[in-house]
Image (cartoon, grey):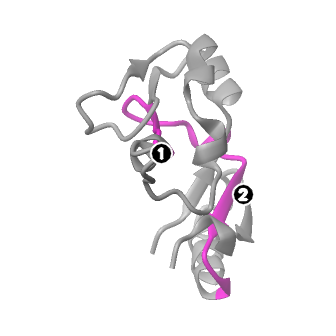
Amino acid sequence: MLVYLVTSVQAVQRSGARFVFTDGHGLATFTIWYDDVRELHQVDWGLVGARYWTDTSEDNDRRRRKQAEFLVWQSLDWSLIRGIGVFDGTVKARVATTLGRFPDRQQPKVAVKRDWYYY
């Protein structure tokens, strides 16, 4: 089961959490790593949001760039989570049950976001 925890770059930055982001898949040797939000324009946002992103003869680097990453060092405070995206109603119910075990904690909205998944 894969769920998406949703926050924002601005929220992470305001929290003081250390972070890095990449212009592509982190394991590729030519991927560039950044730690300054002023460099977010280096991410190919159109491709990150694209539904179809296979490499083409005109652009054989699409797959790597689609997999740009934003990573937070060690942990992210739960209060920064603004939403949770899930595949279907069954997973939504499981997440809701899990959240219900922690009634004293922030309860972010859980939404089915099938278009966030590839199947």
Residue to which mark 2 is pinned: 107
| Mark 1 or 2, closer to the camera | 1
- Residue 7 in which image quadrant: top right
User: How many dots with numbers?
Assistant: 2
| Quadrant containing the N terminus in the rendered view | bottom left
> What is the span of residues highlighted in magenta in the rendered image?
66-89
Point out residue 70 in the picture as x, y percentages from the top left corner. 49, 35
Residue to which mark 1 is pinned: 58
The answer to whether residue 20 is left or right of residue 77 is left
Q: Residue at x 65, y 78 (%)?
A: 92
Q: Residues within 10 Å of mark 2 (few under 14, many from 20)?
A: some
Q: Residues within 10 Å of mark 1 (few under 14, many from 20)?
A: few
Point out residue 12 in the picture as x, y percentages from the top left corner. 61, 27
Q: Amino acid at mark 2?
A: Gln
Q: Amino acid at mark 1?
A: Glu
Separation of marks 1 and 2 at Cα, in angstroms:
45 Å
Q: Residue at x 71, y 54 (%)?
A: 83
Residue 71 painted magenta: yes
Q: Residue at x 62, y 71 (%)?
A: 86
Point out residue 18 in the picture as x, y percentages from the top left corner. 46, 20
The answer to whether residue 26 is left or right of residue 2 is left
For this orientation, the residue located farthest to the bottom is 90
Point out residue 44 in the picture as x, y percentages from the top left corner. 58, 35
